[in-house]
Image (cartoon, rainbow, N blue to C red):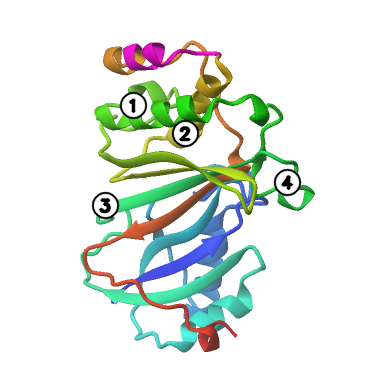
Amino acid sequence: MRYFIEFAYNGTRFSGYQIQLNGYTVQECVQNALGVLLKQPTPIVGCGRTDAGVHAKQYFAHFDSEQELGEKMVYHLNAILGKEVVIYNLHKVPPTAHARFDASSRSYEYYVDVVYNPLRQESAYFCTYSQQLNIDLMQAAAKLLLDFQDFNTFCKTKSSAKTTLCDLRVSEWHYDAKEQQLVYRVTANRFLRGMIRLIVGMCLNVGKGRIELETIRQALEQKQPLQKALSAPAQGLYLMDIEYPYIEPQPILFDQLL
């Protein structure tokens, strides 16, 4: 039987999602907990990779189990996991369902503090020159991306991606006056390695007047990296709102988490 496990995590103290030789990862953390409960090694396949320090408000991974798993499985997993990861739901899915390849849509949000907040050192990026940013130009830069499908310009070097094509559906900034934050939201069918942090860095450079919109357009048309590329810090980035054709959004049941 195949299950999708739905969870969230604070990425600050993880070396990214995917298991690696040096550093503790989200994948390793969740697999260890499943292995304890199922009494055998239980590998999981995630919906995507996140870098060290990047967070997830919603994440899906799939795994196989020979036994039927009940609702209490969520409670037992949360009792084992540390404070950086919380399991929200367990979904029984068809045996061919795939957490990575079947996702029809993914969204990210990036949070830029315009006023320093010491409580958000690990959860947002404080931009020291935020008062100098031209928000209209940043919005124009974000909207410009919707005219393109090939994003080699915003792909980290040495990427293993077989294609740099992405179907962007949302790319926009808004200002949250209550939180005193600039928020960038982007939705697509898939993303490239380091793509969103490079896009945010580009928008900040445009807003600061360090690079022209026409330069961005030319780089995208020529599929070339930007000479003044800036990758925004990891702590402001959140993966969220992952959609599948066979999973209906479900409420988080309080009694399962406790």
Q: Quadrant of the C terminus?
A: bottom right
The residue positioned 44% from the left and 55% from the top of the image is 240
Q: Residue 22 placed where, x, y %?
A: 62, 43
Q: Are discs 4 and 1 less than 8 Å apart at CB?
A: no
Disc number lying in front (3 or 1) = 1
Residue 230 visible: no
Q: Earlier in the sequence, mark 2 or mark 3?
A: 3
Question: Does dot 4 land on a helix, a strand or a loop?
Answer: loop
Q: Compare residues 88 and 131 and report the one nearer the observer.
A: 131
Q: Residue 142 placed where, x, y %?
A: 40, 31
Is residue 166 found left or right of 54 in the rendered image?
Answer: left
Q: Amino acid at mark 1?
A: Leu
| Magenta-drawn segment | 210-218
Q: Amino acid at mark 2?
A: Gly
Q: CA distance from mark 1 to mark 2?
A: 19 Å
The residue positioned 57% from the left and 62% from the top of the image is 29
Q: CA distance from mark 2 to mark 3?
A: 19 Å
The residue positioned 39% from the left and 17% from the top of the image is 216
Q: Are discs 2 and 3 less than 8 Å apart at CB?
A: no
Residue topped by disc 1: 144
Q: Earlier in the sequence, mark 3 or mark 1?
A: 3
